[in-house]
Amino acid sequence: FDPITTTVVLGVGATLGRTIWNYLHESCDPKWVAFNGTALNADLDSKLFGQHIASRIILKAVSGFMSNDNPKKPLVLSLHGWTGTGKNFVSQLIADSIYKEGMDSSFVHVFTSELHFPHSSQLDTYKTQLQQWIKGNVTNCAHSMFIFDEMDKMHPGLIDSIKPYLDYYDKLDGVSYRKAIFIFLSNAGAESIIQTALDFWKTGQQREEIELKDLETALSLAVFNNKKSGLWHTSLIDKNLVDFFVPFLPLEYKHVVQCAMAEMKARGVEPDQNVADQVARDLVYFPKAERVFAVKGCKTIESKLDYYT
Ligand SMILES: Nc1ncnc2c1ncn2[C@@H]1O[C@H](COP(=O)(O)OP(=O)(O)OP(=O)(O)O)[C@@H](O)[C@H]1O
């Protein structure tokens, strides 16, 4: 081959190789990272049960943020509610709507306080590692997502250490964090949400009539005043770094039935109403007198179904 042919062949080969590589391996480009608002809307509608307020806020917040090419700050969502009501599940739906690989995407990072930051004596090491992890990953892909589970168990100092990344800075050390998404999950404020839901139930009002404003004040007071919750200790709230507080209502019998039916469908078996009812009847409900809300939400449905099917 003459030199020109060799150069052309090598050039074409390299381009082809790169295309195949990008095709097979996740990269931070629109083929792998592209928001699908229609899919998120459909998923929230059909897969998330009993959470009309959370569903609405999430759709609006994520759609608004993702359609803005030049956001002023990263999107910070704080999801609050009783156990098993769908906080992790919604995070997964959000990830599915942005990343082709969903939660398996290398741009989605989940931290659990007790797993990743178990020893308070190591706080300084955790701080450095966490900051480096966030910086490295946002440098690699601006549309990175960071989920912090059990936020109420996280050391306040550690929350403080990520504060700069949530703020309105154009760039920090040359890196812009404004396209990243931070999701905080916690049970903080769950009691106040439950109280409001119970009050509505007692007065015979529809659960769907509960509005964000019915929960907002009680929720922020509960989060602020709960010394255990961690969030109160930081200036996350007073500096308005959290864009949306998202309340998750406690789940009732009918929602548990819906979860059981959905789980059967996901397993590829014909959903059986009798089995779903049996599973739902087998759960424990609270408060003791009224027995309205499932103690574990939809959390144990999966294992319960193994028993009944
Ligand atoms: N509102 C819901 N609609 C549909 N499925 C749900 C809902 N809530 C929970 N589930 C199901 O139950 C499982 C466990 O719920 P999830 O992990 O989201 O609860 P959580 O609110 O994050 O609880 P925790 O506070 O204990 O972490 C989910 O994977 C999902 O299958």
Image (tube, rainbow, N blue to C red):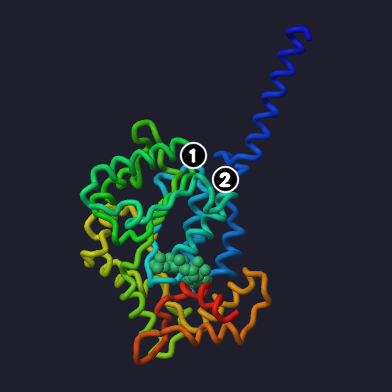
**Residue for badge 1:** 141
**3D distance between C-alphas at marks 1 and 2:** 10 Å
- Residue closer to the observer: 257 or 220: 257
**Mark 1 crowd level (few <14, some 14–19, many ≥20, 10 Å Cα):** some
Q: Position of residue 162 (x, y in %)?
A: 31, 46
Residue drawn at point x = 43 percent, y = 81 percent: 294
Residue, x 35% and y 61% (percent of image)?
150
Q: Looking at numbered disc 2 in the image, what kind of residue is underneath it?
A: Val
Tag 1 secondary structure: loop
Residue furthest out toward the top: 2
Judging depth in this view, the residue of 297 and 304 nearest the camera is 304
Q: Answer with left or right where residue 287 lies relative to residue 224.
A: right
Q: Is residue 52 visible?
A: no
Q: Foreground: 64 or 116? A: 116
Residue beneath the point at 47% across and 74% down: 300
As drawn, the label of residue 126 is none
Does mark 2 have its CB less than 8 Å from ligand 1? no
Q: Which secondary structure lies at badge 2?
A: loop
Three-letter amino acid code at the position of disc 1: Cys
- The quarter in which the N terminus is drawn is top right
Residues marked 1 and 2 touching at CB (< 8 Å): yes
Give percent across and percent down for residue 224. 24, 64
